[in-house]
Image: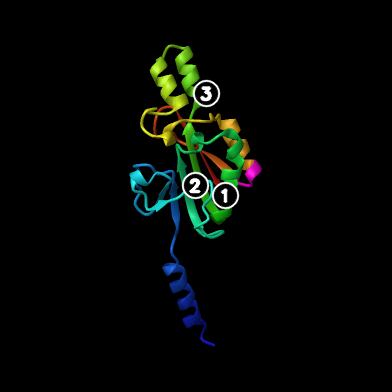
Amino acid sequence: MDTGSTKSRQETNRDTKKIMKLNLGSGFVKIPGFINVDIDKNVEPDMVADIRDLKEIENESVDEILASHVLEHFLQKETFGILREWYRVLKKEGIIYVIVPDINKIISDYTQGKANLCCLEKVILGSDQSATEFMIHKNIFTRKKLKRFLIVTGYRDIIDLPPQREYELGLGAIK
């Protein structure tokens, strides 16, 4: 048996293996290299789907999930089920990034006079309330609460992500 040619085939298979990355609840933010998934067909995502039930996606087929400013659009009682669904599609050792509004930061800034009522409402209730039904926030998160949901779901090696915008918190984790 020629181990050199076997090794070459294995390397080729590894190189041609397609990496699947999901941008869940993408809205109008399309990220190159990701499958942009949203329930609202008007934002023209790559895949129109309810991210609570990703039945079109096979178990353990996704390498990376980005869920930026989407988890707060669901009721708290749905959070665990949603994270379990994302866990189902994520490969072993796959990475998830969850970014949500930072309720502690906005409340602190508001009570100290550093943020106005309009800003507080936008962070807590969602952006433009007249935009679509999908834009309304139904849940709030602290770092501790989000981390607890990730741990209970089975994610590990949880890290803090640096905020890209004011009043957001993010955590990354591995399946």
Residue at the extreme bottom = 1
Mark 3 sits on what residue? 104
Position in image of residue 37 (x %, y %): 42, 49
Please state which of residues 50 and 22 is positioned toward the viewer in this rendering: 50
Give the residue number, with chain letter if any, for mark 2. Answer: 51
Q: Residues within 10 Å of mark 3 (few under 14, many from 20)?
A: some
Q: CA distance from mark 1 to mark 2?
A: 8 Å
Which of the two marks, 1 or 3, is nearer to us in this view?
1
Quadrant that contains the N terminus: bottom right
Specify whether 83 is left or right of 127. right
Cα distance between the residues tagged 1 and 3: 27 Å
Residue at (53% x, 54% y) in the render: 94
The residue indicated by pointer 1 is: 85
Horizontal and vertical percent position of residue 70: 47, 38
Image position, residue 67 (x, y; %): 47, 43
Amino acid, disc 3: Asn
Q: Locate residue 83: give its quadrant.
A: top right
* Mark found first going from the N terminus, 1 or 3: 1
The span picked out in magenta is 152-156
Given contact means CB atoms under 8 Å apart, are the residues at marks 1 and 2 in contact?
A: yes
